[in-house]
Amino acid sequence: MCGRYAQSKNMADLVEEFGITGLSPFSPLPANWNIAPTQEIYIVRQTSAGSRELATASWGLIGHWHKDDAQARASQSHAINARSESIFEKPTFRDSFRKRRCLIPADGYYEWATALGQYRPKQPFYISGTDGVSLSMAGIWSLWTSPSGQIVQSASIITREAVGMLLPIHSRMPVLLPSDRWERWLDPAEKEIDELRGLMEFSEPDRGLYAHAVSDKVNFTANNGPSMTEAITLGEPETLF
């Protein structure tokens, strides 16, 4: 799964990097090196008119059936990730998968080692690209209207089975879409399930990624700043290398 990530680029950089031609948020989000579920995040999506816009959403998809704010917010922590293998059939995600797909920009994301790997369980790692370009995580978004009439936008990150050098850390990873697939992925007119599933499949999904261990400080949402992503050296007992 992907339970925390970093996004520190300003709106101007994201607008250029993701080819935004439409609207952008009136108020920018602050740089955040320890984004947690239910916090506001940037999403990139395409409008029905064909323009690509930058918007914000609460991390954790809210199903349209929730009746009150407490229930809706409580549900978010269980819907921050959607599995690519079943997203098209799960009631919480399937409608958004067909109609409301997005990209979620990230500097990198955090993963905690499982007991099945070669590192001590719960050792945090930071996974990012090696070229400074944002990761473009595949996502879905939705709208929920509260009883008071407030419209809440929410989003989830799509995950897949981990491969390659990521496997010793965790069994899951975000679906990272190359730029040549953005247009079709974001197009709300593209609704064929098999076509959409095919867009999430390609060889070497871990290409260009780099992982390093980071401090346990990232475990606490109150901790933030660039130091969250700084590499630490693991002691000999903590790794088989």
Image: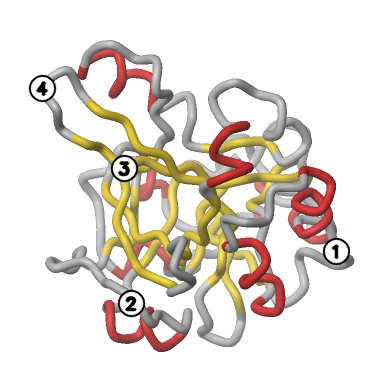
Q: Secondary structure at mark 2?
A: loop
Mark 3, Cα crowd under 10 Å, few <14 / some 14-19 / many 20+, is some
Which residue position is annotated with label 2?
A: 9
Kind of residue at disc 2: Lys
The mark closer to the camera, 3 or 2, is: 3
Q: Please indicate, yes or no, whether residue 13 appears anywhere in the rendered image.
A: yes
Q: Secondary structure at mark 3?
A: strand
Mark 2, Cα crowd under 10 Å, few <14 / some 14-19 / many 20+, is some
Which residue position is annotated with label 3?
A: 153
The mark closer to the camera, 3 or 1, is: 3
Q: Please indicate, yes or no, whether residue 240 appears anywhere in the rendered image.
A: no
Question: Residue 184, located in which quarter of the rendered image?
Answer: bottom right
Contact flag, marks 3 and 2 (Cβ < 8 Å): no
Dot placed on the residue nearer the N-terminal end, 1 or 2: 2
Which residue position is annotated with label 1?
A: 202
Dot placed on the residue nearer the N-terminal end, 3 or 1: 3
What x and y, as percent, mark residue 166? 74, 55
The mark closer to the camera, 4 or 1, is: 4
What x and y, as percent, mark residue 101? 55, 52
The Cα atoms of the two marked residues, 2 and 4, are separated by: 34 Å
Dot placed on the residue nearer the N-terminal end, 4 or 1: 4
Dot placed on the residue nearer the N-terminal end, 3 or 2: 2
Contact flag, marks 3 and 4 (Cβ < 8 Å): no
Kind of residue at disc 3: Gln
The Cα atoms of the two marked residues, 3 and 2, are separated by: 21 Å
Kind of residue at disc 4: Ser
Residue at horizontal 63 percent and vertical 65 percent from the top? 211
What x and y, as percent, mark residue 59? 37, 42
Dot placed on the residue nearer the N-terminal end, 3 or 4: 4
Q: Which mark is residue 148?
A: 4
